[in-house]
Image (cartoon, coloured by chain):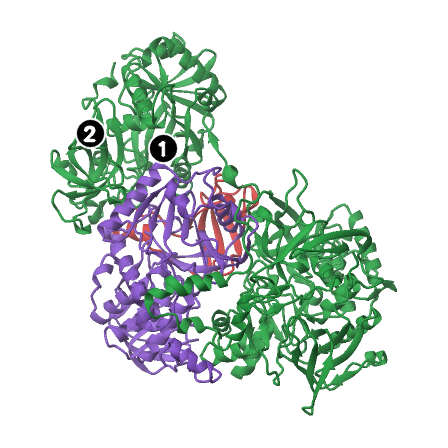
Chain colours: A purple, B red, C green
């Protein structure tokens, strides 16, 4: 059933009895043209675009838990395309363009809200670095504005302009950046893919791959063996674990990133603000909670939870820019598994195993990439060649040196 | 986390700086195929879910590099030694 | 003022200490010992809040931190705290609170129209609509939703109170000061363990405060007082009331918040409002009790519908009557106590409705009307309960008049902290509740938190857990006389939802999630418990589902035809109760957010009126303005000009300084630097370049050989810590066999750059005359220990400015004296101090790279330093620096730039595109890294990286800077702008 105000009204008058499942609880078939491993935002988006753009509908998405149970369902919901490097920027901008038409495209209100992303800078050197990035964005035809202190103050007057350890000098603003409702993105893609014939198979964990003569032919799961002509991995923090089942060793470490939400309050902050003298980002959800986060904890972990020093750091950084937070209470904190790559940028590429495709290395920035990641991964799987904007996101770039290192932090995942 | 530094005793993990996998070994730079070996050394990781030997630097303490054996699923630490070898 | 619902006697309040307070502009009176909730109740205030979505009128449901309904804005002005539970606020004189999420008033709230529209506003309605036209979402729908959403209002201004962080270590942390916790603390304390007993309440006792239990024949509160006295007498037991243990972290670390002064209008001077604790405990005993749950039936959210245990708490502890005529609806024995206690308190009991067929025998004597096998299906009354409909087993409907309905749907053990490290609670059919599964290492669970619901069980379990914890910490078992108490009835038969309900039956009160919503979510496929939560917002309110979750998932199990154990729970995440930013931040805020490092000459520079700038953790003198100078540029120009004309001094103590010693020190340096240091003679310095193992430049600096086996290295200010760590890594991890040691001496030496043609003349006056400073005896790149007065100093002939220059290092404690002595010696040469701006200008004039260029993205070749990469030895980064993409001839390489129009200003961060080329990313050829106005050349100059830059000297490109409207045509030139021959180094 198409979602609209009319369908909602109609159902309201018959007790909402007519709504059907947003996606079928599909049973695995014995064979698919394409199997996507990972029922997060990226995996579901991939299936959606495979069906919608490439007409490939004999597709299964395998998810070991419930869909959206990984990072898609536990992030800080920020969308933006304010990247510096030519390997990244066109990709994220393509994602932004897809965000801009997403809800009408998949008929689900994902609450895409272009409320602006403001990166604060705190020194002349940082201003110049942000100018470099803003100029790079403009070269890619992406909106970017460099604001001085007064302009920032006019926009977010409640920050600390007079008594800060690292004074606010200004900010880099991308007005088209903003937030989206993370779970709704998952459900919207799931519903859209399901309507086009994709099987979404939950509680189905991959336990092995069938590889013959250097080509993948299928996989083993907790719900039986499935044959597949092509298999795409989109399993975020579990990338190394799943890829090792196919004999691959990757430039990836799994790290824990914590995120936080406050109690709901009346509208207090309109845009997304990030702190430049540390690592802190905050926005307010439509429900009223302040959603915020900071650095990864910094050590390999599959534990889905973080530790106290990072919690304290993040909240200190929040207070550093916004002293009025003192009496606001943090309601809930959680941790997710980040597939931290060695240069801080993602990988969408073929693998040494024919028919096996890789989508990983999203670090803590995968949510904003969801539409383009799905689009480009679908293109790669369908056509066996990269979509143009993702052409730089190669697996072999670590060997060749064509790195995409936005931070210049080098081959140390926890510094990205 | 609390890391039992063999020199300083158990200390909060905020005193330490993490580097990563302690099992990779810097290859012989003169050997044939050194560039492939270095690529693997610098970039490829097992990234296990379970026991992980990893390097931590006690920068806020004795400045020792430690090899910590830690379970990445539970964070349980089962062993800590000096990276340079030797005992106290 | 007379509080109309205050019981004539009893309670743990101090009637001799009346307190006045204001709620929604109306003045009331309470007593010391009241919470805001009990004081409101004593005053007959039933309507306290509005719900999140439907703006339904709500009253007080609980008597603890699990309260979902009765949230207020507490205090006013910058101290306003939204969403504060009235049930946890200790009453103080002058307290001011206001209801929230309503307009124009609590009693008449326009938002309540949502309740009328609720048939449209079902779970997830917003996902299905507001999509058309696309623009309307952000312009119209979303702003409306945002305004309607949220709960209370934030203060908006900076918090005037201050906070502390505190740390504690103990053997046994006991969480909860009820019967089990008290016994655990006593058992561990008597054994000699260091014990911390933390309780959320301002008074120890837990449920004993709310019940009429007896222990050892004494009233429960009397018994508590005795135990507390003994605990207080034990030297290693620390009692922490008003302290909620909120979180469990790895390896025995616990987060806690102590509400030090929240019970006062304003914290006393020099005292914090709250304290955020990190407690490291070898063992913990979780004795957090259990939380009562409601039952879903029609209008079960009306003010006056309360949890049965809360009704007892208000009657027994606070002598506050929730109403005049109370009905009890229960599915368990415990609910009956409410009837008995209300009766004993003189409150009329209308009826007890027990959903079970067989009520417990011991309450039969009360003479109360009892309906067994019956259920409450409907509550009458809008802003307060007026009566209830009861459906009995045969389907007969009875209406009962009452103004309070006490509901008990059973008790959920407070398993929360057992789950913070990944433990999953286990369903118990017997208790109809989840009990702790695997607990965090070192944690024991005792009492009701473990599903032991009777008092006698709690006391026994507390002793056992406390003693066990102490034994595990190496203490002996202490002898113990077990207190005697009743093993009261606690049978329960699960009842989640009354089928006959015709009005909305709420599960999550605050977020307005109803039984219908859960059924709808299940129908739409959101049947995983996590999907249910996310789709309906069940359990996402400020109580984190304490009052809602178990009921919700039980109903999900019911509608989806699964067992509750199969459905499972969502993850219990920290914190147990919401924690303020203040408590987590402590003093690390405003200017004290991070420590400040000051250079040794800081005080002197302040005296000179220097302007300071943040440089990482450091505060450095940026420039030294003089009267009459119109802006910073005029000052910097003067500093540069004066230095190049005569002499200037700059504090460079912020550079990292590392002493490296040992027989293999030179070999070691050869391995960490791209260039060779083993060939460096004693008494000489050399510029060195360090790569990361991935082949990119990590840092640069000079290293001097003071003795055959002794070097001192300098690093950049920014990378000092990282380089030290890197060197230790190279030594301890890569090459432990090398005989080398190193130590950071950055803090130990004050170091001054003295630059300019008269620098030697200044030094001549400072350095003991037995040292020959002539160009021959102490040439460029010489290094030596010298005497300055009675102080042993280090003198390096190093230049960052391109002038003949020295760096003089003295022990840091002489830093202040040194800058004064240097300036005195330089007076006759018109010596000036210069700051980081002039330092930067001079290094750009000389084309030296710094942090803007060593940004982690560039290689030595990119920086024009390829010649420093030795081909005769291995070093860190050598192999990976040979990767094909890093050898690409098209890579941007460092060159200089000057504006084609010499009057134009340059800006760092501009990108280079060929003249006349279209503005696209494909034409992006590099970027400007650093710029300065060169007073020596009289125009702006810049360094930048440009594709094939060195081959394009003389060509012009466009420096594209749209974000600052700063498009400039620039000419490519050598990066060395001033004195390209370097003649000025030698004088």
Say which residue appears at 25% left-offset and 13% top-offset.
C987
Q: Are marks 2 and 1 in contact (CB under 8 Å)?
A: no
With C970 as the anchor, is C110 left or right in this view?
right
Can residue A112 be seen here? The reply is no
> Residue A318: percent from the left, percent from the top?
48, 48
In the image as oriented, which residue stretches furthest toward the bottom?
A: C394
> Which disc is residue C716 wearing?
1
How many angstroms separate mark 2 from mark 1 (CA)? Answer: 33 Å
Q: Nearer the viewer, residue B72 or A272?
A: A272
**For residue C579, what is the image quadrant?**
bottom right
Q: In the rendered structure, find residue A252 and report the number of the disc placed on it.
A: none
Q: Are marks 2 and 1 on the same chain?
A: yes
Mark 1 secondary-structure assignment? loop
Q: In this rendering, would C133 be left or right of C326?
A: left
Residue C980 image offset from top left, x and y in percent: 19, 24
Image quadrant of residue C244? bottom right
- Can you identify the residue that label 2 sits on? C903
């Amino acid at each position: 059933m198409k979602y609209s105000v009319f369908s909602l009204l109609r159902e309201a008058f018959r007790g909402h009895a007519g709504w059907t499942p947003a996606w079928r609880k599909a049973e695995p078939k014995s064979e698919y043209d394409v199997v996507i491993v990972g029922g997060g935002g990226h995996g579901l988006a991939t299936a959606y675009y495979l069906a919608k753009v490439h007409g490939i509908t004999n597709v299964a998405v395998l998810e070991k838990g419930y869909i959206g149970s990984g990072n898609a369902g536990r992030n800080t919901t920020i969308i933006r395309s304010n990247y510096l490097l030519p390997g990244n920027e066109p990709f994220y901008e393509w994602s932004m363009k897809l965000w801009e038409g997403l809800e009408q495209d998949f008929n689900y209100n994902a609450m895409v809200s272009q409320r602006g992303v403001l990166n604060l800078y705190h020194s002349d050197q940082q201003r110049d670095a942000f100018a470099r990035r803003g100029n790079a964005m403009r070269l890619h035809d992406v909106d970017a504005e460099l604001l001085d202190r007064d302009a920032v103050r006019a926009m977010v007057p409640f920050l600390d302009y007079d008594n800060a350890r690292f004074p606010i000098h200004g900010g880099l603003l991308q007005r088209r950046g903003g937030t989206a409702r993370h779970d709704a993105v998952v459900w919207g893609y799931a519903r859209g893919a399901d309507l086009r014939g994709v099987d979404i198979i939950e509680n189905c964990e991959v336990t092995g791959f069938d590889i013959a003569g250097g080509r993948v032919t299928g996989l083993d799961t907790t719900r039986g063996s499935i044959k597949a002509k092509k298999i795409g991995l989109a399993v975020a923090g579990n990338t190394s674990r799943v890829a090792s089942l196919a004999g691959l060793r990757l430039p990836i470490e799994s790290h824990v990133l914590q995120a936080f939400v406050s109690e709901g309050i009346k509208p207090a902050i309109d845009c997304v603000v990030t702190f430049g003298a540390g690592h802190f980002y905050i926005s307010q959800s439509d429900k009223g909670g302040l959603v915020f986060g900071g650095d990864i904890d910094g050590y390999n972990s599959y534990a889905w939870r973080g530790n106290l020093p990072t919690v304290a750091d993040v909240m200190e950084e929040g207070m550093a820019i916004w002293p009025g937070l003192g009496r606001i209470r943090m309601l809930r904190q959680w941790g997710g598994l980040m597939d931290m790559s060695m240069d801080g940028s993602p990988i969408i590429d073929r693998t040494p195993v024919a028919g096996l495709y890789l989508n990983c290395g999203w670090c803590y920035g995968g949510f904003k990439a969801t539409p383009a990641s799905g689009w480009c991964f679908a293109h790669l799987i369908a056509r066996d060649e990269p979509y143009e904007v993702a052409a730089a996101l190669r697996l072999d770039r670590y060997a060749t040196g064509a790195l995409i290192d936005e931070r210049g932090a080098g081959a140390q995942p926890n510094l990205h | 986390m609390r890391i039992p530094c063999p020199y300083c005793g158990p200390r909060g993990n905020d005193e330490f700086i993490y580097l990563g996998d302690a099992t990779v070994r810097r290859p012989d730079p003169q050997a044939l195929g050194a560039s492939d070996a270095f690529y693997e050394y610098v970039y490829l990781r097992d990234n296990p879910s379970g026991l992980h030997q990893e390097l931590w630097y006690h920068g806020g303490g004795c400045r020792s590099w430690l090899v910590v054996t830690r379970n990445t699923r539970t964070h349980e630490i089962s062993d800590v030694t000096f990276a340079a070898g030797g005992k106290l | 003022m007379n509080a109309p619902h205050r019981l004539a006697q009893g309670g743990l309040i101090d009637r001799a200490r009346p307190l006045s307070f204001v709620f929604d502009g109306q003045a009331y009176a309470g007593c010391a010992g009241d919470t805001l909730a009990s004081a409101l109740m004593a005053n007959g205030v039933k309507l306290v809040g509005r719900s999140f979505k439907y703006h339904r009128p709500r009253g007080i449901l609980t008597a603890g931190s699990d309260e979902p309904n009765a949230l207020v804005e507490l205090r006013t002005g910058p101290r306003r705290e939204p969403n504060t539970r009235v049930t946890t606020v200790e009453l103080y004189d002058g307290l001011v609170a206001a209801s929230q999420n309503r307009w124009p008033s609590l009693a008449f709230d326009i938002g309540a129209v949502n309740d009328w529209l609720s048939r449209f506003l079902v779970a997830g309605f917003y996902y299905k609509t507001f999509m058309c036209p696309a623009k309307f979402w952000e312009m119209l729908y979303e702003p409306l939703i945002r305004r309607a959403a949220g709960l209370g209002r934030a203060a908006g201004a900076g918090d005037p109170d201050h906070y502390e962080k505190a740390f504690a270590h103990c053997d046994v942390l006991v969480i909860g000061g009820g019967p089990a916790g008290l016994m655990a603390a006593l058992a561990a304390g008597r054994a000699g363990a260091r014990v911390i007993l933390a309780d959320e309440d301002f008074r120890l006792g837990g449920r004993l405060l709310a019940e009429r239990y007896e222990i050892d024949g004494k009233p429960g509160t009397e018994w508590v007082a005795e135990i507390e006295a003994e605990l207080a007498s034990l030297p290693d037991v620390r009692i922490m009331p008003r302290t909620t243990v909120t979180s469990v972290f790895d390896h025995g670390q616990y987060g806690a918040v102590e509400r030090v002064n929240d019970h006062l209008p304003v914290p006393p001077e020099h005292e914090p409002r709250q304290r955020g604790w990190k407690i490291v405990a070898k063992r913990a005993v979780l004795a957090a009790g259990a939380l009562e749950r409601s039952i879903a039936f029609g209008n079960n959210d009306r003010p006056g519908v309360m949890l049965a245990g809360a009704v007892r708490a208000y009657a027994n502890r606070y002598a506050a009557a929730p109403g005049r005529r109370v009905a009890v609806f229960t599915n368990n024995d415990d609910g009956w106590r409410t009837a008995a206690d209300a009766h004993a308190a003189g409150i009329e009991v209308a009826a007890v409705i027990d959903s079970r067929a067989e009520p417990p025998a011991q309450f039969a004597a009360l003479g109360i009307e009892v309906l067994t096998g019956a259920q409450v299906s409907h509550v009458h009354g809008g802003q307060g309960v007026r009566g209830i409909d009861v459906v009995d087993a045969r389907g007969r409907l009875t209406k009962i008049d009452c103004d309070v309905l006490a509901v008990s749907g059973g008790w959920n053990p407070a398993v929360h902290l057992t789950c913070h490290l990944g433990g999953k609670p286990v369903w118990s059919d017997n208790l109809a509740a989840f009990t702790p599964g695997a607990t965090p290492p070192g944690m024991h669970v005792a009492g009701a938190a473990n599903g032991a619901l009777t008092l006698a069980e709690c006391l026994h379990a507390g002793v056992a857990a406390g003693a066990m914890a102490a034994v595990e910490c190496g203490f002996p078992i202490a002898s113990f006389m077990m207190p005697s108490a009743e093993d009261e009835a606690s049978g329960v038969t699960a009842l989640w939802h009354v089928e006959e309900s015709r009005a909305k039956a709420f599960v999550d009160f605050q977020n307005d999630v109803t039984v219908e919503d859960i059924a709808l979510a299940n129908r739409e496929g959101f049947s995983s418990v996590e999907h249910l939560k996310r789709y309906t917002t069940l359990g996402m309110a400020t109580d984190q589902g304490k009052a809602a979750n178990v009921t919700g998932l039980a109903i999900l199990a019911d509608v989806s035809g699964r067992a509750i154990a199969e459905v499972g729970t969502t993850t219990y995440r920290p914190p147990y109760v919401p924690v303020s930013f203040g408590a987590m931040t402590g003093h690390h805020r405003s200017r004290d957010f991070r420590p400040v490092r000051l250079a040794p000459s800081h005080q002197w520079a302040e005296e000179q009126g220097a302007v300071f700038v943040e440089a990482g953790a450091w505060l450095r003198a940026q420039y030294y303005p003089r009267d009459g100078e119109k802006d910073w540029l005029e000052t910097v120009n003067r500093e540069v000009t004066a230095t190049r004309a005569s002499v200037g001094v700059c504090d460079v103590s912020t550079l990292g300084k590392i002493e490296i010693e040992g027989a293999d020190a030179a070999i070691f340096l050869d391995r960490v630097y791209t260039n060779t240091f083993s060939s460096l003679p004693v008494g000489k310095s050399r510029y060195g370049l360090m790569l990361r193992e991935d082949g990119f430049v990590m840092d640069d600096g000079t290293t001097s050989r003071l003795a055959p086996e002794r070097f001192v290295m300098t690093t950049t200010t920014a990378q000092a810590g990282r380089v030290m760590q890197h060197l230790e890594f190279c030594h301890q991890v890569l090459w432990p066999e090398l005989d080398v040691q190193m130590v950071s001496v950055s803090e130990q030496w004050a170091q001054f750059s003295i630059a300019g043609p008269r620098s030697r003349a200044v030094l001549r006056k400072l350095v003991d005359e037995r040292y020959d400073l002539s160009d021959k005896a102490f040439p460029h790149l010489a290094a030596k220990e010298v005497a300055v007065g009675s102080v042993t100093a280090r003198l390096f002939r190093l230049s960052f400015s391109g002038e003949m220059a020295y760096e003089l290092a003295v022990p840091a404690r002489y830093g202040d004296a040194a800058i004064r002595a240097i300036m005195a010696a330089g007076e006759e040469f018109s010596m000036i101090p210069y700051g980081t701006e002039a330092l930067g200008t001079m290094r750009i004039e000389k084309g030296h790279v710094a942090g803007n260029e060593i940004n982690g993205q560039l290689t030595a070749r990119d920086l024009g330093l390829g010649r420093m990469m030795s081909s005769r030895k291995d070093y860190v980064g050598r192999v990976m620096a040979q990767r094909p993409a890093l050898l690409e001839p098209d890579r941007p390489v460092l060159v200089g730039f000057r504006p084609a129009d010499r009057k134009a200003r340059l800006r760092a961060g501009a990108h280079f595109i060929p003249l006349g080329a279209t503005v696209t990313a494909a034409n992006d050829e590099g970027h400007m890294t650093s710029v300065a106005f060169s007073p020596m050349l009289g125009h702006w100059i810049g360094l930048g990286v440009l594709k094939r830059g060195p081959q394009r000297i003389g060509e012009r490109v466009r420096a594209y800077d749209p974000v600052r409207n700063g498009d400039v045509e620039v000419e490519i030139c050598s990066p060395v702008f001033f004195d390209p021959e370097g003649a000025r180094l030698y004088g």
